[in-house]
Amino acid sequence: MRLKTLDIGSVGTEDVFGNLADIEFVAFDTETTGLSPVSSRLVEISGVKFKLGVDAAEVFSSLINPQCYIPREATRVHGITNEMVESAPTVKEVVPNFFSWINVRNTVLLAHNASFDLGFLRVAANALQSPLPNKYVIDTLRLSRKLVSDVPNHQLATIVRHLGLPSGGYHRALADSYHVRNLLARLVENYSLRYWQDISDLNGLLRMRQEQHSGETPVQVQNFVQVINAAISENRPVSFRYNGLRSRARRVKPQAVVENKGNFYLTAFCYHFEAERTFRLDKMSEVKLMAAAGR
């Protein structure tokens, strides 16, 4: 059985859109509780919908209650506190609304270090069993590495300052979405990018939907996925041992199976810790479907 991965690679060089001036772009950004799309959660997502050369823009922006504690180190980066998201909508509301907002004919997304943001959106879509829009994504980090030299790094703030663009407000999703919008416009102007093929030739394109994983998934992991999917479908808990046969059997309520870089993970409510936990399926053994509570 071949299964999908969250790895996001480059796409082909087909000339899909033609002139860049005719495309409706969506510059977007996310803020999170941490760096891993599997074990961390979204706390904010924003986007700016625009056309090159047009000042008017449509905006989407929302905080997200991650339903877990936001670590202090994450708050130090983006400034979003637990108090700020306490009354915010959850990912179940925000992400489908964002997908609906971007899923307009001929829109193209763009983000700086797009694979990071896409990883979180893809895990969220997987957990929500929500289809991802079939969109191309321009990574302005890749473009800047190809085009901009004589800079100490290609972080968004560094490139924005280097190109003399308006700066400030970094690491909040809406502010960074505007920075990405301005960055694309400046790169197009400075380096005479006119056509879709120009972006493709610079290896700047990704796809939002998952590529097929090229390797075979171990049979044991396939079997575990089937048991867990049955538990989710039937609203039943599972038990398993983790990190070796001598470990204590755990009892959890599965929420979703997600995949990242060829590894499968179970997100579940752990009855022992009375909290959500994430487990790698290849470290699990003796996975068993249990009777539903109250039976």
Image: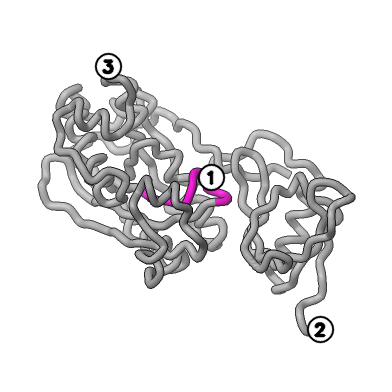
x then y, percent, for residue 158: 26, 29
x then y, percent, for residue 69: 50, 60
Secondary structure under the numbered disc 2 in the rendered image: loop
* Overall secondary structure of the magenta section: loop
Residue placed under numbered mark 3 in the picture: 149
Of the pair 161 and 259, the residue shown nearer to us: 161
Residue 106 visible at all: no
Badge 2: few (under 14), some or many (20 or more) residues near its Cα, within 10 Å?
Answer: few
Colour option used: one colour
Residue 173: say if magenta.
Answer: no
Mark 2 against mark 1, which lies toward the viewer? Answer: 1
Determine whether 38 is above or below 197 in the image. below
Cα–Cα gap, marks 1 and 3: 30 Å
Residue placed under numbered mark 1 in the picture: 36
Mark 2 or mark 1, earlier in chain: 1
Badge 1: few (under 14), some or many (20 or more) residues near its Cα, within 10 Å?
Answer: few
Left or right position of 70 against 15: right
For the magenta stretch, what is the residue range? Answer: 30-39
Q: Residue at x 51, y 56 (%)?
A: 124
Quarter of the image for the C terminus: give it: bottom right
Q: Residue at x 73, y 49 (%)?
A: 281
Q: Amino acid at mark 1?
A: Ser
Left or right position of 171 against 67: left
Determine whether 50 is above or below 226 in the image. above
Q: How many marks?
A: 3
